[in-house]
Amino acid sequence: MPIFPVSDVSLGASVGFGFQAMSSRCEIRLEGDDEAVLARAAQDAIAEVRRIEQKYSRYRADSIVSQINAAAGTDEPVVVDDETASLLAFAERLHGWSDGLFDVTSGVLRRAWDFRRAQLPPPGALEALLPLIGWQQVEWDGRRIRLPRAGMEIDFGGFGKEYAADRAAALLAGAGQRHGFVNLGGDIRVLGARADGRGWRFGIQHPRRADGTIASVEMAGGALATSGDYERHFELDGRRYCHVLDPRSGWPVSAWASVSVVAPACVAAGALTTIAMLKGAAAPDFLATEGASWLAVDTSLRRFQGGPTDGCRFDDEESS
């Protein structure tokens, strides 16, 4: 989701490296004395993002995700490497942690929903897809995976960008970078404070005004992610339908306009925002148990927030 640095006329020695990946505008911003060193570190991190995109994109026939999906309904499980195994194990944990709401098999619902068109799925479309959803159906032993029903799919889109942001930040840190951040379409991992000790300030996009912010947060480390009902959506007969879909019913969620979370890692922040959107009215109670700082905006634009008192603070801000 769009989250962006608040305008700062005194950027100092920071250098931004913009690129396109995972269907998003992305940026790596670093501070240091040698721009050539910064550029080399950024290019290596960008290459890592692109590697992850190629390996796990469901749009590429040669990706491991496509290989797993192509074997759905056959008798042969797919053997995966260590990195993929760790992501599948993470998906399994998320499924349990969310009481089944975060489900990487629910991507099949896109066959019924087209958010470029203001129309509902045809009668029976969702009912036909629901039997294909359910991590509990997946045969997974830690090394081999089998999707037992023809037509089943897995999709890492729910945490793929967040994982890539964490990996890019790890590469930058390994190259000695200590001041900067990775922003993959609004999924942000902060390497450390600016060279002068100040934190980086990020604006949280207003869920109803594309050119405005509704809050801001200053960070010297950790990660920030937002889920919302405003990026891929359509409105029909006065109701908004967004791309965050409940795997139990196949229908879009409707309680929150956006949820933002700050957590130590981007995969954690992103998972918390998505689960909170899916939890509906129970989201504040859920987030309160997780120890992260959070801001939730309901569809009436009322703000709710919580988290450790010594953690980061979401500041009220409304601009256009």
Image (spheres, rainbow, N blue to C red):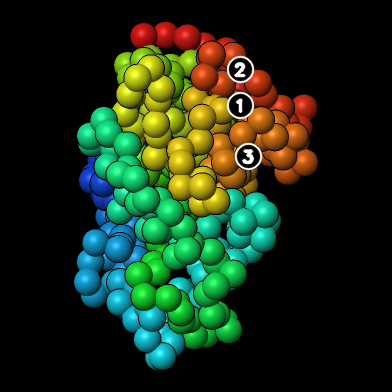
Which three-letter amino acid code belongs to the residue tagged 3? Answer: Lys
Q: Which mark is residue 250?
A: none
Q: Are marks 3 and 2 in contact (CB under 8 Å)?
A: no
Q: Nearer the viewer, residue 212 or 180?
A: 212
Dot 1 amino acid type:
Leu
Which of disc 2 and disc 3 is earlier in sequence?
3
**In the current view of this chain or complex, which residue is farthest to the top?**
319
**Which mark, residue 295?**
1
Q: Point out the tag, 1 or 3, that comes first from the N-terminus.
A: 3
Can you tell which of label 1 and label 3 is closer to the viewer?
3
Q: Position of residue 48 (x, y in %)?
A: 34, 62
Q: Residue at point 40% right, 58% down?
A: 129
Residue at 34%, 66% (x, y): give it.
Answer: 56
Reading the image, the residue beneath label 3 is 279
Q: Residue at x 34, y 32 (%)?
A: 233
Q: Are marks 1 and 2 in contact (CB under 8 Å)?
A: yes
Residue 309 visible to an observer of this rendering: yes
Q: Nearer the viewer, residue 67 or 113?
A: 113
C-alpha distance separating marks 1 and 3 = 15 Å
Q: Is residue 146 above or below residue 305?
A: below
Instruction: Give the secondary structure at mark 3.
Output: helix
Residue at point 30%, 62% (across, down): 57
Q: Amino acid at mark 2?
A: Arg
The residue at which mark 2 appears reads as 303
**Residue 113 appearing in the image:** no
What is the quadrant of the C terminus in the image? top left
